[in-house]
Amino acid sequence: MLAVLLTALIAQATLLTEIRIQGATVELMMVIAILAGFHGGPERGMFVAFFAGLLQDSLISVPLGLHALVFPPLAVAVSSLEQRMVRLTPVADALALLLASTAGIFMIVAAGLLFGLSPFDPSVLLTRILIAAAMTTAIAIPVNRAVRWAVMGGLPPEIKIRSIDS
Amino acid sequence: MAAQRPANRPRPTLLILLAAALTLLTLQFRGLQPLDAFQQGVRDIVEPVRTLSDRLTDPIQTAWNGVFDYDALRMENERLEIELARMRGNTLTSEADTELLSRLLSEVDIAYSDFDTLVVRLLGRPPGNFSSHMVEVDKGTDDGLKEGMAVVTGAGLVGRLDQVDRSRSLVQLATHPDFKVGVRLVTSQDEGLANGTGTEGLVRIESGVRLDAQVEHGEVLVTSGGRSLFPADIPVGRVLDPDSDADYRRSIIVELSADLENLSFLKVVLPVQQTGVVR
């Protein structure tokens, strides 16, 4: 998992920083936090999310702990949603991811404002959040497999033993 | 039938992680040095990879900008063509204006070009979405830069160095809502505190200037110096709205003289005693 996080950090700091639409960019570490919650369950997801947040905080010019404050609840919420969904389809997954990304970026902005940061021009705030969320959702397709492999270690997340009533 | 609740209950662990994050935030706001050093260390480790990546991905970035900023580039091109035509048509007026401006500057003893500066190259915006009104430049502490130094172009004030790593620095642009600078109105000689508005190209003076002060539209502003970190007499901009009708609190809108949207090379103003820096 550490390798995935560090690779993502490098990608976030380099290539993805250059790719911007209307000033918005991909929140790669957030995708990892969300997918870790989705594939790894709440416990594993929140730990991966916490360290993803810490790495993100270390890289960009925000106080250490800001993303680490937002990512774990996001991972737990996604995990909880995944466990309650009756049927998983790619479209539902994508919509859930888009929703989670949008909520996550809103939470970061809110936490940032709470701690005295003024991250966005109010006139472009909503547009930028939505574009960033859409870009973040799009990047999840290639990232998904790597995160699933990393959080599950090649094994299923849990083995359920069920009794067979004959 | 209600959905079955998950077997594991992550709440205590989640609360511990949230408490840890809040503790880190609190310690950082209280100025704990090791946390700053940790962040700087991570950035310094990543920096060589970023530099390499910047070089490798330059064509990709150019292509990306070509695709997604095509309209903006076309509009900018049209704007520049109109500007060029206007400038050609007004050559004589411009020369007269230039002469008048130089006379005005000499009257108030402005020696802007005498500052000792270090030229830095703009690298782009820093990573993440929390980077509005911030840009990254290619020099840092290894080149003698320090936090708080003024950043200018030939047109005037651009911002200040906000975060200085070994070989990169973040510039907080003058439009950033947290940006503050002491300014002096050249004609009326009133002084005030200007701060960023979060809007492109504009700063606002909300304190310092008297309600009855005669401030004209188009009046030139420079940095006031004094106890400010910035040297005096750096051009800041021109008054766009003097807010002369204010009853209680005056809010003067200033248009920055430097174009913050089209930056490429910037100059960091060095302290007077700092000499011998390679430029």
Image (spheres, coloured by chain):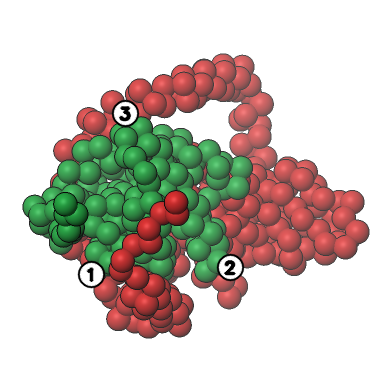
Q: Quadrant of residue B43?
A: bottom left
- Output the chain of dot 1: B
Extreme left residue here? A154
Residue B225, labelled with which disc?
2
Of the numbered discs in the image, which one, if any, rests on residue B273? none
Comes first in the chain, label 1 or label 3: 1
Residue A48 spot, x, y in % from top left: 25, 63
Q: Which chain did the renderer colour red? A: B
- Side (left or right) of B110 relative to A144: right
Amino acid at circle 2: Gly
Residue B67 at x, y percent in the picture: 35, 23
Question: How much space separates mark 1 and mark 2, taking CA atoms?
Answer: 33 Å
User: Residue A98 at what x, y percent from top left?
Assistant: 41, 41
Q: Nearer the viewer, residue B151 or A158?
A: A158
For the residue marked with disc 1, what is the amino acid? Gly
On the question of residue B32 being in view, the answer is yes
Please state the chain letter of the residue tagged with numbered disc 2 in the rendered image.
Answer: B
Q: Which residue is mark 3?
A: B64
Residue A93 drawn above or below residue A3: above
- Callout 3: few (<14), some (14-19), or many (20+) C-alpha neighbours within 10 Å? some
Q: Nearer the viewer, residue B7 or B149?
A: B7
Labels 3, 2: front one: 3
Q: Secondary structure at mark 1?
A: helix
Identify the residue at image location x=31%, y=34%: A90
Asked if residue B217 lies left or right of residue A49, the reply is: right
